[in-house]
Image: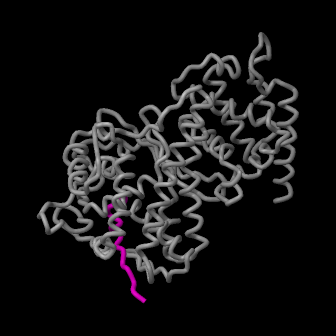
C-alpha cells in the first residue's frame, strides 16, 4: 500500500505549522473514518497509507462547507436582530497593498482564480481551496509531491518548490499569516521571529484553509478566531486515533460558530466565555464540544496592520451543569435575562452605548460587576451571595424598565438553579 508523506512546517514558524496541522488533522479524521489506512505522525510529517488524495479533498470540502455555514448563520442572526441582512465581515485584501498587489494578484494570475478589489482574505482562501480541489483531480501526484517539500533557507523556510515551467519564485507571506512575528503589539523590526515563510500555491491553499477553519468573524476592528489548542492537535495526530481526531473535527465545526451566535464583542473573558457556552447549539453540546478546551484569539486591525491583542485558553466545561439547567424549556425567561445582561455588559464595555442596556442594567460598573457575579455563580462559586448581588445591583423595576433580576419570577428561577449547583458541588465533594 502506498503512503503519502505530508510535511509539517517547523515549530519555529508557529502560524504556518498551526494552520497546516489543523488542515492535516481534518484530512486524517476523514482518512481514519473511511478506514483508508493508518496515520503515522513524526512531528515533522504525517504519513497517510492508502488514498490520501480523497482524504485531502474531503478536508477541503469540510472547510468550505463550514465557511458557508458561518456566513449563513451570521446573516440569519443579524437579520433577525436588525431586520436586514449583513454580510459576514472579513478583512479586505486592500488593507495591505503588498498583500493585494504582490501576493494575491500573483496567486490569481498563476492559478487562474478570479480576484478583484472587493475580495477579502476569506474569499481568497475559499478560491484557493476550490483551486486545490481542481488540482487534486487534475494532478494528484503533483499536489502530494508539493506537500512533501519543506526546505530551510537563508532567510526562513520554503513550503513547496517554485514552478520550473516559468521559473517564478515562491509567494511571500501575507501579513495576516505573520501574526507570530508582530505578536502582542511588537513594532516593525522588533520581531519575535526573524525568518519568513515562502509558499507555493498548493501550500498557500493548505495553510489558508487551516486559517479559514478557525476564523469566526470580525467585530469592529477586531478579528475573532477560535482554534483547538496546539497540544491537543499534536496529541490527536500522535495518537492517530479516530476519537481524538473526531474531537478536533467537532471543535472546528462548532466552536467558530459560537461568537457568531453570541453576537457580542469579546472584551470581558469570563462573561464572554459563559455567553459562548449558552449560545452553543444543542447538537454541539450533545457532541461534547463544551468539554473541548480551545484558544480564543483577538487580532486588532489598525493602520493597515494586524496586531494580536490576546490569546486566551478557554474551558467551557465548567459551565456545563449551568447550561444544562438554564436551557430547560421552563427556564426560557431566565435564560433570556442572563443573555441580556451578558450582551449588554460586553457591548457597553466595548464602548457601544444602549439606552435599553442602561435602563435594564444601570451603568457600566454595575453591568461588569453583575456579569462577573453571574460567571462565578455559573461555576458554583458563592451561588447565593452572587444571586443576592445580581438582585441588589439590578435597577428597580419602575417606569416600564426591561425585566432584570429584581423580577421575582426571574429570581425564583435563578435561586432554583443556584440550589442545584450548590447541591451538585456537595455531592461531588
Q: Residue at x 34, y 55 (%)?
A: 128
Q: Nearer the viewer, residue 390 or 161?
A: 161
Specify the quadrant that holds the C terminus: bottom right
| Residue 240, above or below 75 | below
Taking the view exactly as shown, the residue that stands out farthest to the left is: 167
| Residue 136, above or below 295 | below
**Where in the figure is residue 407, as x and y percent of width and height?**
83, 24
321 sits left or right of 204 in the view: right
The boundaries of the magenta stretch are 1-16
Instruction: Count the marks.
Output: 0
Residue 12 on the magenta segment:
yes
Q: Residue at x 34, y 52 (%)?
A: 180
118 sits left or right of 279 in the view: left
Q: Nearer the viewer, residue 206 or 377?
A: 206
Taking the view exactly as shown, the residue that stands out farthest to the top is: 399
| Residue 13, above or below 347 | below
Specify the quadrant that holds the N terminus: bottom left
Residue 260 on the magenta segment:
no
**Image color mode:** one colour
Q: Residue at x 78, y 42 (%)?
A: 382
Image quadrant of residue 266?
top right
**Where in the figure is residue 82, as x and y percent of width and height?**
58, 26
Image quadrant of residue 333?
top right
Image quadrant of residue 147?
bottom left
**Where in the figure is residue 6, as x and y percent of width and height?**
36, 74
Q: Nearer the viewer, residue 68 or 206?
A: 68
**Where in the figure is residue 343, as x and y percent of width and height?**
63, 32
Taking the view exactly as shown, the residue that stands out farthest to the front is: 138
Amino acid at each position: 500500500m502506498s503512503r503519502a508523506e505530508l510535511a509539517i512546517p517547523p515549530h519555529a514558524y508557529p502560524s504556518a505549522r498551526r494552520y497546516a496541522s489543523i488542515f492535516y488533522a481534518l484530512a486524517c479524521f476523514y482518512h481514519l473514518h473511511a478506514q483508508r489506512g493508518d496515520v503515522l505522525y513524526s512531528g515533522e510529517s504525517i504519513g497517510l497509507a492508502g488514498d490520501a488524495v480523497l482524504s485531502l479533498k474531503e478536508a477541503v470540502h469540510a472547510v468550505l462547507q463550514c465557511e458557508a455555514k458561518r456566513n449563513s448563520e451570521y446573516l440569519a442572526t443579524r437579520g433577525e436582530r436588525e431586520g436586514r441582512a449583513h454580510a459576514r465581515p472579513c478583512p479586505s485584501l486592500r488593507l495591505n497593498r503588498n498583500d493585494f498587489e504582490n501576493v494575491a494578484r500573483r496567486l490569481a494570475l498563476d492559478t487562474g482564480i478570479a480576484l478583484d478589489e472587493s475580495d477579502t482574505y476569506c474569499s481568497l482562501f475559499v478560491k484557493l481551496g476550490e483551486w486545490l480541489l481542481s488540482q487534486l483531480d487534475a494532478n494528484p501526484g503533483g499536489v502530494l509531491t508539493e506537500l512533501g517539500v519543506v526546505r530551510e533557507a537563508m532567510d526562513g523556510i520554503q513550503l513547496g518548490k517554485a514552478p520550473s515551467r516559468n521559473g517564478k519564485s515562491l509567494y511571500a507571506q501575507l501579513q495576516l499569516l505573520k501574526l507570530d512575528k508582530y505578536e502582542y503589539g511588537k513594532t516593525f523590526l522588533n520581531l519575535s521571529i526573524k525568518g519568513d515563510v515562502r509558499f507555493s500555491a498548493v501550500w498557500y491553499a493548505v495553510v489558508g484553509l487551516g486559517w479559514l477553519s478557525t476564523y469566526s468573524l470580525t467585530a469592529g476592528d477586531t478579528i475573532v478566531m477560535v482554534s483547538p489548542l496546539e497540544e491537543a492537535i499534536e496529541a490527536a495526530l500522535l495518537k492517530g486515533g479516530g476519537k481524538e481526531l473526531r474531537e478536533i473535527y467537532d471543535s472546528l465545526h462548532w466552536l467558530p460558530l459560537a461568537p457568531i451566535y453570541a453576537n457580542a464583542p469579546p472584551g470581558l473573558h469570563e462573561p464572554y466565555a459563559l455567553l459562548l457556552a449558552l449560545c452553543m447549539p444543542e447538537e454541539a453540546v450533545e457532541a461534547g464540544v463544551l468539554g473541548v478546551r480551545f484558544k480564543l484569539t483577538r487580532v486588532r486591525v489598525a493602520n493597515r496592520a494586524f496586531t494580536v491583542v490576546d490569546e486566551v485558553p478557554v474551558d467551557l466545561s465548567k459551565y456545563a451543569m449551568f447550561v444544562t439547567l438554564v436551557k430547560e424549556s421552563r427556564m426560557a425567561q431566565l435564560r433570556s435575562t442572563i443573555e441580556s445582561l451578558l450582551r449588554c455588559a460586553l457591548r457597553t464595555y466595548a464602548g457601544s452605548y444602549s439606552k435599553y442596556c442602561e435602563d435594564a442594567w444601570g451603568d457600566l460598573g454595575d453591568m461588569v460587576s453583575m456579569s462577573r457575579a453571574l460567571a462565578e455563580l455559573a461555576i458554583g462559586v458563592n451561588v447565593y451571595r452572587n444571586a443576592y448581588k445580581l438582585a441588589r445591583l439590578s435597577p428597580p423595576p419602575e417606569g416600564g424598565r426591561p425585566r432584570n433580576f429584581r423580577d421575582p419570577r426571574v429570581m425564583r428561577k435563578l435561586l432554583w438553579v443556584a440550589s442545584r449547583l450548590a447541591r451538585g458541588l456537595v455531592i461531588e465533594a
